[in-house]
Amino acid sequence: MSTVLSRRDLDFLLFDWLGADDLVERARYAEHSHETFEAVLDLAETIATERFAPINRTLDLHEPIVGPDGKVVLPDGLAEALAVYRDSGMPSAVFPEELGGMQLPYLVAQGAFVFFQAASAAAASYPFLSAGNANLLVAHGSPEQIDRYARPVIEGRWFGTMCLSEPHAGSSLGDITTRAVRQEDGTYRLFGTKMWISGGDHELTENIVHLVLAKVEGAPPGVKGISLFIVPKFVVEDDGSIGERNDVALVGLNHKMGWRGTTNTLLNFGEGFATPGGARGAIGHLVGEEGQGLAQMFHMMNEARIDVGLGAVALGYTGYLHALQYAKERTQGRLAGQKDPSLPMVPIVEHADVRRMLLAQKSYVEGGLGLVLYCSRLVDEQETAPDEATRARAHRLLEVLTPIAKSWPSQWCLAANDLAIQVHGGSGYTRDYPVEQFYRDNRLNPIHEGTHGIQSLDLLGRKVVLDGGAWFAELVSTMRDTVERAAQRQELAQFAAEVGARVDRLVEVTRTLWADGDPAVALANSAVYLEATGHVVIAWVWLEQLLAVGDRTGEFFDGKRAAARYFRVFELPKVDAQFDLLASLDRTVLEVDPAVL
């Protein structure tokens, strides 16, 4: 049994449920077939298993350091694994053929990339961030910028970052102080400091393309004054060759609980630390027009949020598989009621509470993977569906689901990792088994690309009220359609009724929260709203999976039914108390005096 990821489950979700094969009928993917999709998945599984997984523990035990020459030192094996990834063509998976890409559906590319995230989150982080970087440039950069800065990233020769946060600002991007000064030659000079920059400095590639948020002198205050700039580590000459070092300096490395193999940096722009002769400003190139930076960066951030959800699922899933294997091999105790000490000990998977923990993990990770891949299919729909109405519908659904797809797996697949440790018992709390690392690695996902609180404000404060609630209504209608179809099947009718009742309650509570139009009251418990909505959505995803299972039998399909039953019986009822709390418009967190905390 593979302990990286279940290929059987991935194939079921991609082909049986989400209809990846149907995408080859569209012009963009016409050169592909089921066979090419399977070949990409095979290649990803092989590289992830043979190259990424073996170095995962090494990357955790040997954090990046700054050597005597000021360069980042990374453990052996990482550069070699990433070179194999580059040579396979994987960095170009979703990009168009004219840019040297495979032009794969986003759905299939995500199905391939989840193997790498499961095998080594730290190693996978470098190409993960780089792909988002190049995608943003392809969407918003000029043809010259795409050719000069995006192509090398697409080819895997360079990596890319996003530089948003600053030590004093955190997620409050309107308060950034990095400034950009216009130059007569059309470039800008940037001065400032950026914090928490993953992949911000290393020697893995010959150049790093930083995408940096800054404010041009004289720009309006707040987010309206933010612009986006390309700031390469090394200046790129007109012929594409690497020039002198740009004024981008590594100030220090952050040491994290997990993802230890990913350099996480404090970078200084424009203070002369990286170049001889003193400060001259980091040379930057404006993307688009001044003042568009935040909107452009959200192109990358929204994609990254779906990918964060996928990464959370990947770590939860591999942790579940490790726990399952351990539970089948580890013998301890005897079954309840067996008091004869001469009886042999049984594998712990025979104990009811261990099965409970395994079922919980299975329901979280298989439900979470379904949600994120569904969102990936929506990306393909909004870009390639044959008619505008279908594309618009997919866009609305994706916008509403994105904060859920980021946060729900980050919370509940982390809970799966916690249970994986528990299944291992005391052994799980040691470094002799990898489940403790999976937990530490996954603990980042509820934080980066926007915390649960930020995602909940986005969902309840923005997404559900867009266009008078029409976008939210699109999701509700989609879930109700599934409920109606499931109600026609006798074995699913009760589950369908229970999901339908919670969808109705979700609509009712949403109206109640916004009835008085007071944002302070409506949003006070937005995190509770996000969690409850996420559970309803996952229940809907499980109902969809059961419809795809149909009446097929066998261990795999029976396992789907068992996990769905667990979620229905143990998890879905939790939302009732949460909805009651929300409907009460409770003001506890608004009225508490910070002095008493």
Image (tube, rainbow, N blue to C red):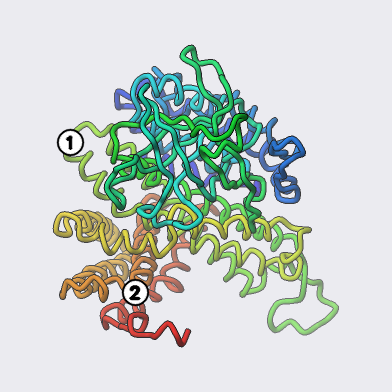
Amino acid type of the residue that numbered disc 2 sits on in the rendered structure: Asn
Q: Residue furthest front?
A: 277
Would you say 311 lies left or right of 420 here?
Answer: left
The one nearer the camera, 53 or 145, is 145
Q: Residue furthest bottom?
A: 596
The one nearer the camera, 282 or 100, is 282
Look at the image and tell me whether residue 139 can be seen: yes
Please tell me how many numbered marks the rendered image carries: 2
Q: Which residue is mark 1?
A: 388
**Residue 245 pos. (x, y %):** 58, 27
Q: Name the residue located 52 percent from the left edge and 54 percent from the top edge.
A: 312
Amino acid type of the residue that numbered disc 1 sits on in the rendered structure: Glu
Residue 581: quadrant of the picture = bottom left
Q: Which residue is mark 2?
A: 525
Provide the secondary structure element on which disc 2 rests.
loop
Look at the image and tell me whether residue 5 can be seen: no
Q: Name the residue located 47 percent from the left edge and 32 percent from the top edge.
A: 231
Real-space CA distance between mark 2 and mark 1, rounded to the nearest whole angstrom: 36 Å
Q: Name the residue located 49 percent from the left edge and 35 percent from the top edge.
A: 210
Provide the secondary structure element on which disc 1 rests.
helix
**Residue 523 pos. (x, y %):** 29, 71
